Image (cartoon, rainbow, N blue to C red):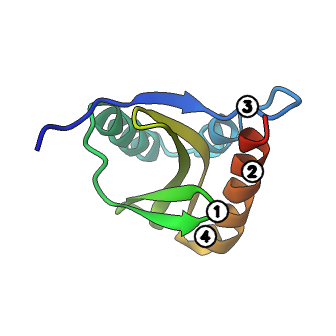
Amino acid sequence: MESQPREIQRYVTPDGKIPFDQWYESLSDAKTQYKIDARIERIALGNLGDYRFVGAGVYEFRINYGPGYRLYFGQIGLKIVLLLFGGDKSTQKQDIRQAQEYWKDYDKH
């Protein structure tokens, strides 16, 4: 089966903030950022890898590194991945709720 390239976009709040980028920039470890960048690049090429549906229109990419990083996203059609938020296993429940709120906000506009 041929992989389908994806366009990567980031959710922007009504006041112009980009939650995914804020989370990403808060990471102090360059190796962690590299792992996340590499995963996003693979997603853009169509290799979605390890992900699952977490409810209310939101999915979770899992990165098996460090504390178990998570990238939360919604899908717009078949070709666009909208990055909503990021986190790790220790804050997973709160991060999922936050990502679902962002998706709900995006979906109503």
Q: Three-letter amino acid code at disc 1?
A: Ala
User: Viewer-proximal residue, 21 or 78?
Assistant: 78
Residue 85 is left or right of residue 44, and the answer is right
Residue type marked 4 = Gln
Q: Which residue is mark 2?
A: 104
Q: Residue at x 80, y 35 (%)?
A: 13
Sequence-earlier tag: 1 or 4: 1
The structure residue drawn at horizontal position 59% and vertical position 58%, both measured from the top left corner, is 87
Mark 3–mark 2 distance (CA, rounded to whole Å)? 12 Å
Q: Which residue, given by chain and number where applicable, does mark 3 sit on?
A: 12
Residue sitting nearer the eye, 47 or 76? 76
Horizontal and vertical percent for residue 57? Answer: 59, 56
Q: Secondary structure at mark 4?
A: helix
- Where is mark 1, residue-wise? 56
Circle 4 sits on which residue?
92
Residue 55: image x %, image y %? 59, 67
